[in-house]
Image: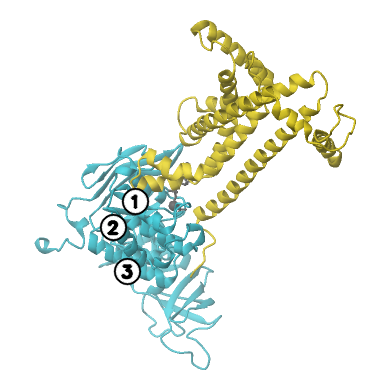
Amino acid sequence: MLCFGFTFLYVPMVLLIVYSFNYSKIVPVWGGWSTRWYTVLFESEEVWAAITLSLKIALMNATFATMLGALAGLALVRFKSFRGRTLFGGMISAPLVMPEVITGLSLLLLFITLGQLIGWPTNRGITTITIAHITFSMAYVAVIIQSRLTGLDQSLEEAAEDLGAKPFRVLIDITLPLLAPGLLAGWLLAFTLSIDDLVIASFVSGPGANTLPMLIYSRVRLGLRPDINAMATIIIIVVAIGVCLAGWLMMRQERQRQRDMQLASGDNIKQD
Amino acid sequence: MSNNIDFSERPWLDPEAEPFIRIQGLTKNFGAFTAVDSVDLDIYKGELFSLLGGSGCGKTTLLRMLAGFETPSAGRVFIDGTDMTDVPPYERPVNMMFQSYALFPHMNVEANVAYGLKRDGVAKGEIKRRVHDMLEMVELGIFSKRKPHQLSGGQRQRVALARSLVKKPKVLLLDEPLGALDKRLREQTQFELMNIQDELGVTFVVVTHDQEEAMTLSTRIAVMDEGQFVQIGTPTEIYEYPDNRFVANFIGSANMFEGRVQKRVDKNLVVNVPALKGELIVEYSAEIADGSKVWLAIRPEKMSISTTLTDTNSVNVLSGIVHDIGYLGSMSTYRIELEDKKIIDITYPNQHRPRDGKHLAEWDDKVYLKFDPSNVVLLTR
Ligand SMILES: Nc1ncnc2c1ncn2[C@@H]1O[C@H](COP(=O)(O)OP(=O)(O)OP(=O)(O)O)[C@@H](O)[C@H]1O
Ligand SMILES: [Mg+2]
C-alpha cells in the first residue's frame, strides 16, 4: 500500500522532469533529449516577470512572517499570564486549518472593503499578495518558535537576568541565539509556502500581477505544454531544496534541544 | 556577663544588630498549593546560612524569591535595609547559582563567566583578569575555550559557581552548589567559599542536601518542612537540641521513644515508656507537668554497647539481641532488637581490633546499651 502511495506521489514528478527534457512539442510524444524548452522558457518576458514577482513576494513574506511569527511565539510562551492568551493562541493557529479558499476569499473581501473605506490598496498585486501570504505563513512560524521555546530551559534566561541583563538584553544575548535554528527553519518554510501558493494569490491578486504558480495554471488550462514542464521542474527543485534545508535545520534543532535538556538537568555526571 | 559577649561571631544574638537580609511573612502560592508559607527570617552580614529540608519543601522557591524570579504572594524582602520585593532580578545585589547550573550553551566557559561583568560595564582588561583568576580558582583554566556540553557534570558545576562568584555580589544564593563534586574538590571549594566569605564579606544562603556540609560550613541552619521553618539555629543547636521530632529525625538519626512524664527527681525527669515496659531518666530543667506526653530522642552515637552488664543498678540500660552490624572501619553501626521487638540503632567506635577474629559484638549476641540522662533529648512535639 505504502509503495503504491509513493508511486503515485513520485512517478508523476519524475515523468514531469523527464518530459521537460523532451524535444517534441506534443507532450506525451517522445522526441529525444533536449533543453530547448528551458531556453524558450527563459526567453519569455512573461515568465521572468512571474519568477521575479514570486521571489520578491516570497522573500518579503519569509522575512516579515518570521519576525511576526517569532513575536507571537514569544508572547505565547514567555508571557504566560496576559489576558486573552488562550484566545490568541487559538487564533494564531487558525490559518493552519482554515481552507485556503476561505482565507483567500476573506482577505479579498478585506482588501476591497479597505479600498472603499480608506482608498488603500488602490490596486491589488504584489502588496496584497505579500500581506495575504504573511498572514498565513506567520502561523506556521509561530508554531515552530513555540515548540522551540517550550523546550528551552527558562533558567537560562533567568540566569542572564540574574547576572545583570535587562529583559531586552536577555532576548538579544540568550533567547534569539538559542532560537536561531528555529528562526531559520521558519524563514525557509514561509518562503516555500509562498512560492507554492496558488489559491490565495489568485484571490488577492489583480490584473497583470501573476505569480509563477498562477502563470503555470493559466497556461496549462489550455492543455499540457512542454515549457511549463520545464518551469515545473525548476519549481520542484527549488521547493525540494527548501524543504530539505528546513527539515535538516529542525532536526539539528531537535538534537540541540535534547543536548541542552541533558545539560540543564545536570545529569550524566562524571566525576573527574 | 551580658556586657562582654562578643557578638561578632554570632550577630543573631545581638539585639542591636541590623540584619542584612530581612524576610517578613514571605509566602508563595502556586494556585491552591502553598510552597512557602509565611516565613520570617533575619540573616546577618557575612553569614553562611544553610537551608535544609526534604525534596519539595520550598527551598528553591524561597531562594528564587530572594533573587527576584518569583513574585511573592505576600510578604516583604529587605536586603541591606532596602525593600527589594518589587525590584527586578537584574537590579538586585544578589547572584544565584542555579540547581540546574543554567550555563549558556552557545557560549564557551570564558564567555559564560565573563557575561555578568560585561553587563556591568567592567573594563575589558579587568574582565579578562578576573575571569582568568576565577577559572584558575575552580581549576578550569585549561577548559576556558570549551562549550558547556563538552564538560563533565562536576566541571559544569564549577563553571556555574565561578559565574556567580566572579561578580562579587553582596549576597550569593547557592542551590546545591557542591553536589556533583568529588570529595577533594568539594572540600577545596568549601574552603574557597569560606575564604571568599572572609575576604569579601559576602553573605551566603545555601541550599543543600548534604547535612555534613551544612554542619561544617554554616553559621546557622534553617530546617524547612512544607514551606515553613521548623527550627533555625547553629549546627550544634540543631543537632544536639532539636526543637521537635521532625528536626530530630531529619538531621542525623535518632531513636525515638514515646512516653509520659512520671515525676521529677532533682534535675531529672522519670519518664514512663510503654514500649520498654519501664522508665527512662532524662535530664530536663524546664518546667513540665507530670503526666505530659513526651518523646525521647537518643542519638545512635550517644550510647555505649557492651556484652556484659557491669553495674547492675545503673539507670537507662536496655538489653537486646544484635540484629545487624555495619562495619565502617573507624566505627560500626549496630541494629539491636530489644525484648519487645523494637529496633534501635547505635554507632560505636571500634576502639580495639578484633580479638580471636571477633568484634566487640557479633550477630545474635546479647548486648546491653547504656546512656546518660543528659544525652537524652526530651521533645514535647
Ligand atoms: N512554578 C511552579 N508551579 C507550581 N508548583 C511549583 C512551582 N515551582 C515549585 N512548585 C512546587 O512547590 C514546591 C516546592 O518546590 P521547590 O522547588 O521550592 O522545592 P525544593 O525544596 O527546592 O526541592 P528540591 O530539594 O527537590 O530541589 C514543590 O512541591 C513544587 O512542586
Ligand atoms: Mg530545589
Q: Chain of mark 3?
A: B
The secondary element bearing badge 1 is classed as helix
Residue A198, position as x, y percentages in the image: 69, 23
Q: Which mark is residue B125?
A: 2
Point out the residue furthest to the right here. A29
The picture's colour for chain B is: cyan
Number of numbered callouts drawn: 3
Residue found 60% across the figure and 45% down from its top: A249
Measured from the top left, where is residue B196 in percent x and y? 28, 63
Q: Is residue A78 left or right of residue A16?
A: left
Q: Identify the mark at residue B191; answer none if there is no mark.
A: 3
Q: Are marks 3 and 2 in contact (CB under 8 Å)?
A: no
Q: Quadrant of residue B175?
A: bottom left
Tint of chain A: yellow
Mark in front: 3 vs 2: 2
On the image, numbered disc 1 is attached to which residue?
Answer: B116
Report whether residue B222 is seen. Answer: no
Give the secondary structure at mark 3: helix
Q: CA distance from mark 1 to mark 2?
A: 15 Å
Point out the tag, 1 or 2, that comes first from the N-terminus: 1
Quadrant assignment, res B91: top left
What residue lies at 69% left-to-right and 25% top-to-bottom? A47
